[in-house]
Image (tube, rainbow, N blue to C red):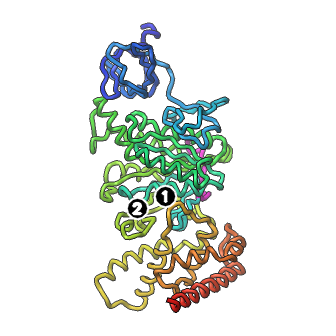
Amino acid sequence: MNNDTALKGTVLEVKDGIIFASGLEDVGINELVEIYTDEFKAVEGIVLDLDITKTGIVALGDFTGIKAGDSILAKQKLPGIAVNENYLGRVIDPLGKELDGKGKIDLKDAKEMPLDKVAPGVIARKDVERPLQTGVLAIDAMIPIGRGQRELVIGDRQTGKTAIAVDTIINQKDKDCYCIYVNIGQKTSKIAQLISQLEQTDALSNTIIVSATASTNAALQYLAPFVGTAIAEYYAEKGKDVLIVYDDLTKHAQAYREISLLLRRPSGREAYPGDIFYLHSKLLERSLQFSDALGGGSITALPLLETQAGDISAYIPTNIISITDGQIFLETDLFNAGQKPAISVGTSVSRVGGAAQTKSMKGLAGQMKLELAQYRELAAFAQYGSDLDQNTKQRLDKGARLMELLKQDQYQPLQLGEMLIVLFAASKGFLEQVPLPQVLAWRDFLFKDINTEKVIKEIDFNSKIEGATEKKLASHLEKVSREFIEQNIVEEADE
């Protein structure tokens, strides 16, 4: 058969953006094609199913004008996106089209990055050992994330998953780390709010947003995370550190399920196609810490995942938990009780752990996770008994203060020095004299003190807090705590 003939086909059937075509005998999976309508308007498509008698194609553009009999031409290339530095600060769709009204992106000297590729092997990588500070005290202290790590953020709807991701992006603005936020199936209003917040905090200039909202078709929602990853690889291959947020992979799995069912593929568990695990593992394996020989760049992935009634044993959650290097589990009960971020200490874990922490943080936060896990167990037990010994009461009191200290408002990430001084205060018992409801007020009072910043500047983040530094911190905290308590006594007397 003539090769030109084997690369031309005819539309047999069109349904919900899925096109079945005859011909195209030499076309491969994931290759691009162009469908020509009566108006000679070319609509791009991607081949996702190969059958003996027909080829399954997913339309990437407006498919309403396509009908049976239209001609198809194979482009003999895999999908990719042209990337250069001009994407920073912009909002695009998965086809690279601008969505922010700021004009066309200049793609001069852009590099074509493939959307789908085999992840680099072990030789191209090195250990994850540099911290990526999220600015969220509970995470940086107990569930540290390293540059090049894949850390899942999982929880029910409306428990603060996106809030953690946005705070992490805001915290990177002066940390020499580019950010990519991939929106998959989220509401347009939510994305508008996110863009507004990033502009207010001056973090948008360091960020690229790839948006496939709920109103876009399943094909674009399917492509979105691959587009974001391809852009991330462009910067990582140049030796840069990149943070990529996938919000969220539940919607991505649902989009792929929709496409697969329309392609008439046999469905598996929970009606998902059998290769959904392969698809997500192939995507997340591309996040890595490059070796020094390859420039030392990194891609850190924060995939978000929505559970139903906290069920982490469902198909997609178990898949992605097994692919990632740990998970941050957000608990609905904690969120409703006012504990924000609502991180469940017992079920959250980082498989990189202390390797992604500075020595100063590791020295202070070492026992914190264990103490909080024990506190929650004790608190549950204490509900059923009133006769508690003194030791148990002290542990409950300390745990309650720690939980209060970990509360943090959205869009207000803490710097490393601020976290260290707060953790030092908790570990050395400076909170014991502060009434529980006033712990956060004490923290605010500490940060506003004129000498706090000077004391923080003297901390060596790369070594344990001891000796002269420890004495100076203790002296400052003692003074601040005394002033705070005296101020409260005066205010109560005035009332």
The stretch drawn in magenta includes residue 131: yes
Marks 1 and 2, Cα distance to the nearest angstrom? 10 Å
* Coordinates of residue 16 in the picture (x, y in percent): 31, 29
Number of other residues with Cα within 10 Å of mark 2, as a class: few under 14, some 14 to 19, many 20 or more:
many
- Residue sitting at 50 percent across and 65 percent down? 409
**What secondary structure prevails in the magenta region?**
loop
| Residue 327 painted magenta | no
Label at residue 330:
2
Amino acid type of the residue tagged 1 in the rendering: Ile
**Left-right relation of 154 to 290:** left
Residue at the spot of label 1? 164
For mark 1, give the secondary structure. Answer: helix
Camera-side mark, 1 or 2: 1
Residue 448 visible from this viewpoint = yes
Judge from the rendering whether residue 101 lies leftward or rightward of residue 304; answer left or right. Answer: right
The answer to which of marks 1 and 2 sits earlier in the sequence is 1
Q: Which mark is residue 144?
A: none
Q: In this view, does 65 lie to the left or right of 485?
A: left
Residues shaded magenta: 118-132
| 86, above or below 129, in the image | above
Residue pictured at 34% horizontal, 42% vertical:
254
Element at label 2: strand
Q: Mark 1 and 2 residues: CB-CB less than 8 Å, in contact? A: yes
